[in-house]
Image (cartoon, rainbow, N blue to C red):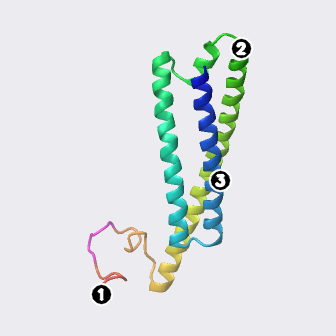
Amino acid sequence: MEEAIRLIRQQILVCARINELFEALREVLRKKAEGKALSNAVKRMEAVFSELSGLEDQQRGFLEAQQQRNMIGFVQAQPASVERDVAMRLLSQLGAWQTRLSRQSVTAKELLRHSKEFVDYHMNVLSQTKAEATYGPPGASAGAGRGPKMFDANV
């Protein structure tokens, strides 16, 4: 049971760090999505997500050794004790963190979409044409009947 509590606590700590990094990413996307600041924010998040992936692997190994499908099932299968109550409270906190992070992920995706639309709009204004993300005319398939594009050297 101590191993389960340790794993759950580590996951809560990682979720708290991811929450902080989502906040930082959101601020970068709101204020100015300059490449270096955005790249740094994403790199920090990648490191924490890889740590979370390692924790999930540890949990998977633990659950296989215990012959359980998930942590909730393992904790509920334990006899009533103080440790079981602690584990149930921690699982509840972890669920709340996961819900919060899911909402933040949706917000970050929306901000990224708006940033992309902003860049696409300005690229179209600069080139004085309407182009899709591949810089071709709307509805044209990539490479079909390719004429000069705005980034070609001869334009």
151 up-or-down from 55: above or below: below
Q: Say whether disc 1 or disc 3 marks the residue closer to the N-terminus.
A: 3
Residue drawn at point x = 28 percent, y = 80 percent = 147
Label 2 sits on what residue type? Ser
Q: Is residue 128 visible in the rendered structure shown here? A: no
Residue closest to the eye, 148 or 95: 95
Please state, as top left, top right, bottom left or bottom right, where the C terminus lies in the image.
Answer: bottom left
Give the distance between the C-alpha atoms of the residues marked 1 and 3, in whole angstroms.
44 Å
Tell which tag, 2 or 1, sits nearer the viewer: 2
Label 1 sits on what residue type? Ala
Residue 46 percent across, percent down from the top left: 49, 53
- Tell me the tag on residue 20: 3
Residue lying furthest bottom: 154
Asked which quadrant contains residue 138, the reply is: bottom left
102 up-or-down from 65: above or below: below
| Category of crowding for the residue at label 2, using alpha-carbon neighbours closer than 10 angstroms: few (below 14), some (14–19), many (at least 20) | few
- Tell me the tag on residue 81: 2
Q: Say whether disc 2 or disc 3 marks the residue closer to the N-terminus.
A: 3
Marks 2 and 1 in Cβ contact (< 8 Å): no
Give the distance between the C-alpha atoms of the residues marked 2 and 3, in whole angstroms.
34 Å
Residue 114 percent across, percent down from the top left: 58, 66
Residue closest to the eye, 5 or 49: 5
**Which range is magenta?**
141-146
Asked which quadrant contains residue 45, the reply is: bottom right
| Category of crowding for the residue at label 3, using alpha-carbon neighbours closer than 10 angstroms: few (below 14), some (14–19), many (at least 20) | few
For numbered disc 1, what is the local secondary structure? loop
Does the stretch in magenta take in 142? yes
For numbered disc 3, what is the local secondary structure? helix
Residue lying furthest front: 2
Give the distance between the C-alpha atoms of the residues marked 2 and 1, in whole angstroms.
73 Å
Tell which tag, 1 or 3, sits nearer the viewer: 3
